[in-house]
Image (cartoon, helix red, strand yellow):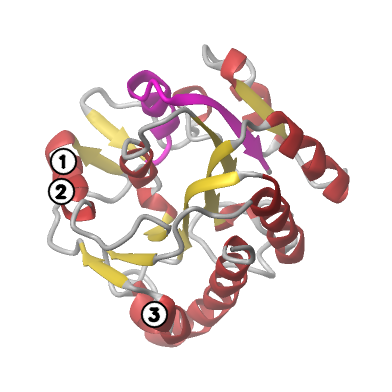
Amino acid sequence: MAIVHREVTLLDFDETFDWQPALVSRARCRVDMRDVAGTRLFCTEEAFDEIRRRLSRRVGRGVTFLGSGDRHYVTLALLAEISRPFDLVLFDRHADMATCAGSVEETPGLLSCGTWLDEAFERLPNLRRAILIGLSEEAARRALQSRWCGRLVVLTGVSDGLGGFARFTNVCGEEVYISVDKDVLDRAFAATNWDHGSMRLDSLTEALRMLVRAKYVVGADVCGEMPAAPVDRWRLSRLSRLNERANIAILDALLACG
């Protein structure tokens, strides 16, 4: 099996990807989102509708790079495009649900990077369940106490190695969507503006290859860039090189079959 679509799209909410030329060279499409107001951490329905409108004009629906994890809620827009039942496989340090949001709390009328998975369960009848991989122990505990616990499968760490990942490929249905937040990785392999997990990059990429070999991957996205604005140019250049290496490795793993 394989990923269904292989096109690569970059979403430009800031200038982050300008610092990743190797990744840019792999992209078929870049979507300029820089003039969409009010998108960091929280997003109004009006802004979200504009994001969806611009996404609808892109070429192909393969792998989408979202930028900072502050806008992980864009995954909701991508999931809404899927017209048949699927499972979500989410690699993330955080569960992105209201009961697990930590510093990003639920705000009525606004989407957020910390609560978008709640919205996905609420809005998307084709989303059957979510398999969460790499959560902190606290996020995992709170996720399993949430109202969605019956539709969640949680793998909290990587101590089980690839055998643990292999078991989760058996849990997934035949059609899956993959979302990767690089904060699941140890800081040696990626730089984000959130706290990090301890997963190695080679463990993540092998898990992705296993999923792509075993399932029909109907789409994928990657976030976890360091936002461009608050970082000086020298530091941004250094961190962008680190993230670009991770992004290329993740992309190669997702496109390994087919």
- The residue shown at (80%, 47%) is 158
- The residue shown at (41%, 36%) is 104
- The residue shown at (29%, 27%) is 107
Is residue 90 shown in magenta? Answer: no
Report the span colored magenta.
113-133
80 or 198: which is nearer to us? 80
Residue type pointed to by label 1? Asp
Residue under label 3, please give it. 24
Mark seen at residue 81: none
Q: Do the residues labelled 3 and 1 touch (CB within 8 Å)?
A: no
CA–CA distance in space, label 2 to label 3: 22 Å
Q: Do the residues labelled 1 and 2 touch (CB within 8 Å)?
A: yes
Question: Which secondary structure lies at badge 1?
Answer: helix
In the image, residue 102 above or below residue 212: above
Residue under label 2, please give it. 53
Residue type pointed to by label 3? Val
Tell whether 54 sits left or right of 17.
Answer: left
Question: Which secondary structure lies at badge 2?
Answer: helix
The answer to whether residue 180 of the structure is visible from this angle is: yes
121 or 240: which is nearer to us? 121
- Residue 198 x/y as whole percent: 73, 54
In the image, residue 97 above or below residue 35: above
- Residue 216 x/y as whole percent: 57, 45
Query: Residue 113, located in which quarter of the rendered image?
Result: top left
